[in-house]
Image (cartoon, rainbow, N blue to C red):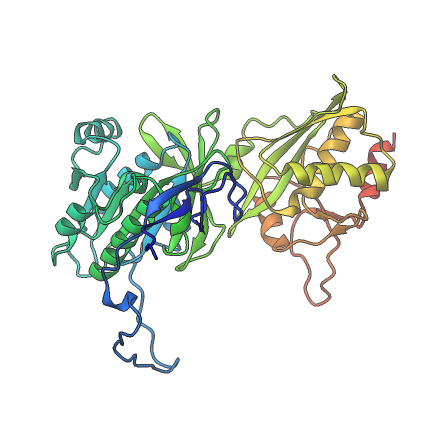
Amino acid sequence: MTKKTSRFVCQACGSVHPRWAGKCDACGEWNTITEEALPEKSSPYETAGHGGKSLEFVDLKGAPEIMFRLTSQIGELDRVCGGGLVPGSVILVGGDPGIGKSTLLLQATAYLTKGVNKLGVPVQAAYISGEESVDQVRLRALRLGLSDAHVELASATSVRNIVATLDTAQAPDVVVIDSIQTMFTDTVESAPGTVAQVRAAGNELIRLAKRRGFVLFLVGHVTKEGTLAGPRVLEHMVDTVLYFEGDRGHHFRILRSVKNRFGATDEIGVFEMTEQGLTEVPNPSALFLAERRGNISGNCVYAGIEGSRPMLVEIQALVAPMGGSAPRRAVVGWDNNRLSMILAVIEARCGLSLANKDVFLNVAGGLKITEPACDLAVAAAIASSLMQKPMPADMVVFGEIGLSGEVRAVAQSDLRLKEASKLGFERALIPPHHAKKTKLQSPLSITEIGHLKTLIDSFLIP
């Protein structure tokens, strides 16, 4: 019997198939399955019948070691990472091309060299680029005013050479690999960027970072669907996964944590893209509301929570007569399916007809909102545009809407109201507070609403 020397691997999700097929059964993508050579068994542990060293188990009791963190002097980045960078951790940074990933990491490595490590000596940082030459990275550093930073720079794509350079006792404290799709290892017979190469190269670099105890940044590109291309197979191997989001038409950038073993998930950091690079935005709520007009129908201020940070953003809705054979539903910054659900609840439970109307929804500033607490603000903006009556300029709104039209309570209402009060708002439209032992402490005038029809009826009152 002939021994198999190849296998068929989906380049989108990494699943292995016994034969070639046009569609991957695991992820549903078309024309992503390619033939790859089987990796050679280089380790004796991969062969059955070989034993290993016995493990020594310990109790859960014991004094945990105090975790030391490197600070990058970029407060937004440190907070998203859980308060700083943990030595030996691996951070995967994904984002669209040109969004600013390389700029952010070059600034971070330059600022890190101004601090000290666990031993009290200056931090050493290395930036390895597989996409740009050394001169191109130097031009970016000159534009950002970072030419004087003590960052070791190299241009390489061979994992074997990178490991041979960094696998020493004098390894740097922070290493950036830009990007993981360009790295290749000669033990795998496939092109750089394929799932096999990304998995093998990422595994070698991660093992090196754990062995030498340096912080490793891996830059990854995303697909048109917004998911990490290739490095998707690395998400379970790394310690932290960060997404760098933003709209090309806006100068705001959002760094979002979707996985973090050393901090909170769904934490965000807000940056502003300028000619001098990325600058921190300490008060994003005030920035997102800077161009707000309070006397226009269809606008509503939503008090949301992104990670552990309260944030106020403006929800804009426009309800217009149907301009074609079917009504249009266009959404920017929110879930399109969620908008369809809210429109169905408004029609079925509140008696308003939107079947012959075009509905457009926008989250001002380019921020993407995912939490369902935005439901009530979206419904208020749609009703305001439909009735041509503006919402009160000093009111914030938040709450989740059920299919029967009920308004459900959301978490961390105190933080939302505190942020609204800090920015000068005086009223709040929120879900009923059912907790008996606790009482909302807020200087705002609070109106609790239990059903969506109550909000719709308030617009019908002359």
Residue 135 lies, in percent from the top left, at: 17, 28
**Which one is in front, 185 or 344?**
185
Q: Residue at x 73, y 36 (%)?
A: 380
Q: Residue at x 44, y 53 (%)?
A: 259
Residue 81 lies, in percent from the top left, at: 38, 52
**Which one is in front, 178 or 148?**
178
Residue 160 lies, in percent from the top left, at: 17, 48
Q: Residue at x 36, y 47 (%)?
A: 92
Report the quarter where the N terminus lies.
bottom left
| Direction from residue 53 to residue 349 in the image, left or right | right
Q: Is residue 122 visible?
A: no
Q: Residue at x 69, y 43 (%)?
A: 375
Residue 283 lies, in percent from the top left, at: 47, 40
| Residue projecting furthest to the front | 1
Q: Is residue 456 visible?
A: yes
- Tell me the quarter of the picture where residue 136 sits: top left
Q: Is residue 424 above or below residue 308?
A: above
- Tell me the quarter of the picture where residue 60 sits: bottom left
Report the quarter where the C terminus lies.
top right
**Which one is in front, 269 or 265?**
265
User: Total marks drawn?
Assistant: 0
| Direction from residue 361 to residue 272 in the image, left or right | left
**Which one is in front, 442 or 54?**
54
| Direction from residue 4 to residue 265 in the image, left or right | right
Q: Is residue 53 above or below residue 385?
A: below
